[in-house]
Image: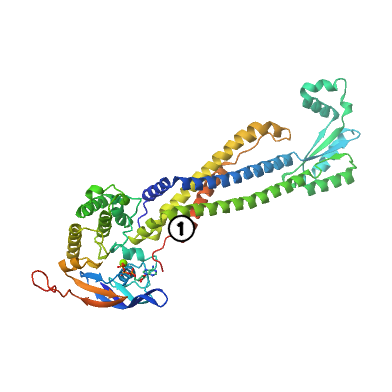
Amino acid sequence: MIQLFNVCKAYQRDQNALSDVTLKIEKGEFVYLTGPSGAGKSTLLKLLYCAERPTRGQILVNGRNITRYGAARIPYLRRNLGIIFQDFKLLIRRTVFENVAFPLEVQGRKRFEISKKVYQTLKNVGLEHRLNYYPLQLSGGEQQRVAVARALVVDPLILLADEPTGNLDPEVTLDIMELFKSANARGTTIIMATHNRNLIQQFPRRIVSLAAGSIALDDWPQFRSPAGLTGRP
Amino acid sequence: MVLRAGYFLKRALRNMRQSPVLSLASVATIAVALALLAFFAIAVLNVQQLTASWGETLAIVAYLDDVPDDKIVKGWVDDIESYPEVAKVTFVSRNAAFERFRKRLGDDADLIEGLGPEVLPASLEISFADDWRNEAAIASVVERLRKDHRFNDLQYGQGWLEKLEAFLLLLRVSGSALGGFLIFAALVIVANTIKLTLYVRQDELEAMAMVGGTSLFIKLPYLVEGALQGLLGGVTALGLSFLVFQVVLQKSLGSLLLITGIDTIHFLPPVWQGMLVVGGSLIGLLGSLFALRKFVRFGSS
Ligand SMILES: Nc1ncnc2c1ncn2[C@@H]1O[C@H](COP(=O)(O)OP(=O)(O)OP(=O)(O)O)[C@@H](O)[C@H]1O
Ligand SMILES: [Mg+2]
């Protein structure tokens, strides 16, 4: 589903945010992307949705080489992706409902279909009572849930989530994780950048750990869960 | 992508509602530029009409010292009418001239009480064919009249036509230059105004691009917005120039201008009115196109 070959990204000369990253993620996988701040997690995700171009290397998504995608093809790539941005990127002049409806509008879906789907998705994230609020009238956690809903509303092939639980209390975090898990069960490939160790312990999945732009670790969690089982299935 | 006109129109109107001051600024800029242009067009149009109507009455009048008998007059008329430049030659006898004079005086006809037709000369009025109403043709006919018939008392437009035509040319050139400048200025101002609204909505444009909006899908509402503002500007310009035309030109200046022989001042013909409105829309459209050029990007590299 996703393959990176020797990918480098330098925002400035001689300063690699990512260096020589080679990575393969199969369809239907759930992968945590971890690593200290500045390690290059967001950069890696940005390369996958073409917000940045690699300085070197090749990137394949869903069987297509997106390395040199231009403005004409990027939108169609993004329609297969659900993206949760670290800074949400909500439309502040649109209501919660309109924000979540927007990716469907872009795809030219029918109005009644949009309404139904949006309502259902907002209900899943527990925001059905905030339909007509504007993003700035919501708490940080609620905004984050709107961002989650907007990413999931399109039933994406791949979900790219950059710190999707950063502002959430543990309870809501679990709710969101349940949503991700059920999307994952329906076939969505998930890459989730996170610092949340507890979360990884609770839902052990493959971990790709970055350090200073390189993959430091790519494995399943090696720790004992409370039941005394290892994380590996 | 399915083009849903209503959807884009709705988004455009919504954008305009959200920044009414900037929208109004665009509309006003286009309106002012086009109204100035319309005034110029009205001036050119009317001067043009004036030269045309003066040209129609263009004639040479040959005054006859003695009145020869009808046969000789008839010979002259036929001869002069055979000139290619000449459309018609009319003999105006002393009686006819006197009668015309009396009529023109109207209420003041008592001024010529006691005078007879002998005070006025008879004349030949020579009018020109459509294609020959110019200075050169007049000169050539005058020369032949002098040579062939020894008519010496000739009266004709002495250079005014050329001057008027030169004035018209000046008006047209300066009008075009000013118009070009005004349109360019309007374009730049509109582009910058729309750019301001785009700055405000930069996050929105980015978010749209991130969820898979195509370039056209993102831009179209702004293009519609520009065109709408241009349309409004064009209509405002039309209304404004019509108002000024009605109030200033027709009511106040009308009677003044009558003296110079201009009896009706014309407004822009319907086609020009249409062009003004269409032109406004085009300015708005191009303005937003310029503004959008650098704005909608899909990545930073
Ligand atoms: N637009 C940019 N221009 C220049 N340098 C950048 C840019 N974005 C990121 N960087 C640099 O690239 C490196 C990796 O940044 P990135 O945002 O990928 O880190 P991260 O792992 O997501 O960190 P965090 O956990 O804090 O979100 C950092 O050193 C950062 O300064
Ligand atoms: Mg980050």
Q: Which residue is mark 1?
A: B292
Instruction: Kindly indicate the quadrant of the structure image that contains residue B204.
Output: bottom left
Q: How many marks?
A: 1
Say what secondary structure mark 1 lies in: helix
Q: Nearer the viewer, residue A59 or B140?
A: A59
Relative to A111, is B239 above or below? Answer: above
Q: Position of residue B160 (x, y in %)?
A: 78, 43
Quarter of the rendering occupied by the N terminus of chain B: bottom left
Instruction: Kindly indicate the quadrant of the structure image that contains residue A86.
Output: bottom left
Q: Nearer the viewer, residue B247 or B262?
A: B247
- Residue at figure coordinates x 8%, y 72% from the top left: A228
On the picture, is A182 further left or further right than A77? left
Q: Nearer the viewer, residue B240 or A91?
A: A91
Quarter of the rendering occupied by the C terminus of chain B: bottom left
The colour style of the image is rainbow
Residue B217 in sight in this render: no
Relative to A204, is B107 above or below? Answer: above
Relative to A227, is B236 above or below? Answer: above
- Residue at figure coordinates x 58%, y 40% from the top left: B241
On the picture, is B58 further left or further right than B119? left
Q: Nearer the viewer, residue A32 or B278?
A: A32
